[in-house]
Image (tube, grey):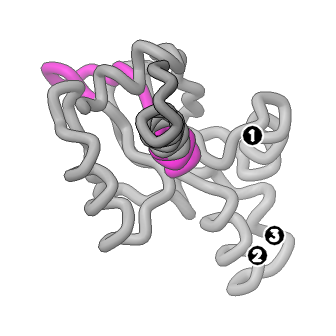
């Protein structure tokens, strides 16, 4: 399975914030959309960074509440690992596990096309396991699904 298969199901909508967006506004955006991270982008197409709830928590612990008025660029990860839609899901799973990423932007020719989260990966894996279980149960009972 490829990342494009995941995007086909979930869609290509990506929530972005500009580097100048305050951390407080970022939190409102994350809550409004029910997401755990946003891509930092000057123009909505180029990935300048990624910022997550985890980044906010770590910055609050290190610098206190003043971080809420700082721009997200001060807490965002600037060196972002991206993948293409052609990337194999297994490779992205491995990347997320080894690097402890929860979100990976999907890029085509330098332009942002989507984000895959660990939740998307788990949801897909559960679907695969349910299909496998159903097929095996049908085989065992003699009922074809």
Q: Name the residue located 51 percent from the left edge and 24 percent from the top edge.
A: 143
Q: In this image, 121 relative to 108: left or right?
A: right
Name which residue lies at 45% across and 20% down.
Answer: 144
Q: Earlier in the sequence, mark 1 or mark 3?
A: 1
Range drawn in magenta: 107-125
The answer to whether the residues at label 1 and label 3 have Cβ atoms under 8 Å apart is no
Quadrant hosting residue 85: top left
Q: Is residue 98 left or right of residue 42?
A: left
Q: Report, in whole angstroms, how far the alpha carbon at label 1 lies from the one at label 3.
A: 19 Å
According to the image, label 1 marks what residue? 30
Q: Is residue 73 visible?
A: yes
Query: In terms of secondary structure, where does tag 2 sit?
Result: helix
Q: Position of residue 109 (x, y in %)?
A: 13, 20
Q: Which residue bears the numbered disc 2?
A: 60
> Which residue is rendered at x = 72% and y = 82% of the image?
63
Q: Report x, y in % for residue 23.
A: 72, 52
The residue that disc 3 covers is 66
Relative side of 80 to 19, left or right: left
Per the image, is 1 magenta?
no
Q: Earlier in the sequence, mark 3 or mark 2?
A: 2
Marks 2 and 1, how far apart in space?
A: 16 Å
* The one of 2 and 125 positioned closer to us in this rendering: 125
Spot occupied by residue 98 in the image (x, y as percentages of width and height):
31, 73
């Amino acid at each position: 399975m490829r990342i494009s298969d995941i995007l086909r199901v979930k869609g290509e909508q990506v929530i972005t914030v500009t580097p100048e967006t305050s951390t407080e506004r970022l939190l409102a955006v994350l809550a409004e959309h029910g997401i755990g991270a946003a891509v930092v982008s000057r123009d909505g197409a180029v990935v300048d960074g990624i910022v997550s709830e985890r980044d906010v928590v770590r910055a609050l612990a290190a610098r206190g509440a003043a971080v809420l008025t700082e721009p997200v660029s001060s807490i965002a990860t600037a060196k972002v690992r991206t993948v293409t839609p052609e990337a194999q899901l297994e490779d992205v799973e491995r990347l997320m596990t080894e690097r402890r990423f929860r979100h990976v932007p999907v890029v085509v020719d330098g332009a942002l096309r989507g984000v895959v989260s660990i939740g998307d990966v788990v949801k897909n894996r559960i679907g695969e396991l349910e299909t496998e279980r159903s097929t095996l149960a049908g085989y065992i009972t003699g009922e074809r699904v």
